[in-house]
Amino acid sequence: MKSKKNWIKRIAGTLMLPVAMYIIMMVACYAAGKTYFGTLDMWKSLIVDISVSVTCALGIGLQFKCGRFDFSGGAIMLLTAIIAGNISKEMNSNVIVFSIICIGMSIILSLMVSLLYVFGRVPIVITTIGMALIFEAITCLIFNGNGINIVANMKLKIFSAYPMILIPLIGAILVYAFFSYFTITGKQSQLLAGNQQSAVNIGINEKKNVIISYLFSGILFGFATMIYATTDLHRASYTSLGTVGELFTNILPVFIGLLIIGFCGDTIGTIIGAITLGIMSFGLRAVFDAELGSAITIVITGLFIIVINTVSAQGTRVVNYFKEIMVKK
């Protein structure tokens, strides 16, 4: 009986945020006359945004759980998308070549970041910012600096449309779960994140941990790029650290996942975070016009993250405070 209650509590805690967000957005949309909210067509449209967010968040979150904040993820995805997209177009839009290049290039670029960090002995923030600048500069030098536009290429676009989008999405989830629960490196990540020096002192090989973790995050960024490359026109980055915006946008599901990690673990938590933010973004864009909706989404997303983090941090203290008042009475 106790086990059953625990499961109910875990399921309720996991689904609380997306269900609450869905109800709020549904009421707002129906009040504005947007009755298509909640339909199958909405979910087919929404799954693209959710899939990009989940796959990218898992790549960033993998390093985050190892105690490393990586600024190079957006640049890796952009450079990979440009190379994979252009080469694939020249090869008659071969989707297999496109997939292999996406994953292969992301792994190579991620490993380059890890090797510079390991052997350069430069702090991770400086390393990843430096590599992001280098990768962005390369996007301006290759293929005449034109970037890539394969939005209308139906052969390559299959990975950003239902149901084929489920392939990179499920692939990324399985890779992240395998790293977290079935590899020694994944299990050691919590120790390195908590106290890096102590973890090294007890025998954990940090260099090996870094290289293996970046190998896995490279695979995740590869899956993310398979979707990301075909969802929009991607221009070469002529603005320094212009790709960091992608990183900060897609790391938000990781923060939400950390709040509900006690109910479902970080893998499912990140997915739930992406679904919650995806529902909110879609609802706001439906209620307001596209440009205003996007601006309001950014503001409300920031406020939402602050509020739920504050509630998470202070929730126990508030509950105990009211318990003390009731006892005194």
Image (cartoon, rainbow, N blue to C red):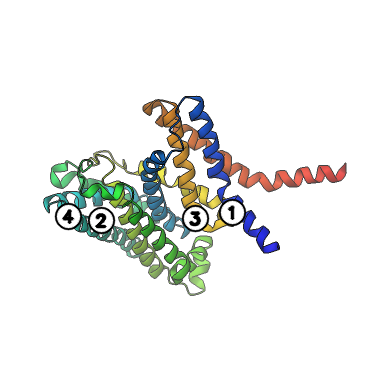
Give, as a three-letter code, the residue at label 3. Ile
Residue 242 visible in this rendered orientation of the protein? yes
Other residues around mark 4 within 10 Å, as few (<14) / some (14–19) / many (≥20) = some
Give, as a three-letter code, the residue at label 2. Cys
Other residues around mark 3 within 10 Å, as few (<14) / some (14–19) / many (≥20) = some
What residue is shown at x 38% (from left), y 39% (from top)?
41
* Contact? badges 4 and 2 (CB < 8 Å): no
| Front in this rendered view, residue 73 or 45 | 45
Other residues around mark 1 within 10 Å, as few (<14) / some (14–19) / many (≥20) = few
What residue is shown at x 41% (from left), y 68% (from top)?
209
Q: Return the mark for residue 11.
A: 1
Vertical comparison of 99 with 205: above or below: above
Give, as a three-letter code, the residue at label 1. Ile
Vertical comparison of 240 with 117: above or below: above
Counting from the top left corner in percent of width and height, residue 17 is at 56, 44
Q: Nearer the viewer, mark 2 or mark 3?
A: 3
The quadrant of the picture occupied by the C terminus is: top right
**Chain-order first, disc 3 or disc 4:** 4
Q: Return the mark for residue 268.
A: 3
Give SS at disc 1.
helix
**Chain-order first, disc 3 or disc 1:** 1
**Chain-order first, disc 4 or disc 2:** 4
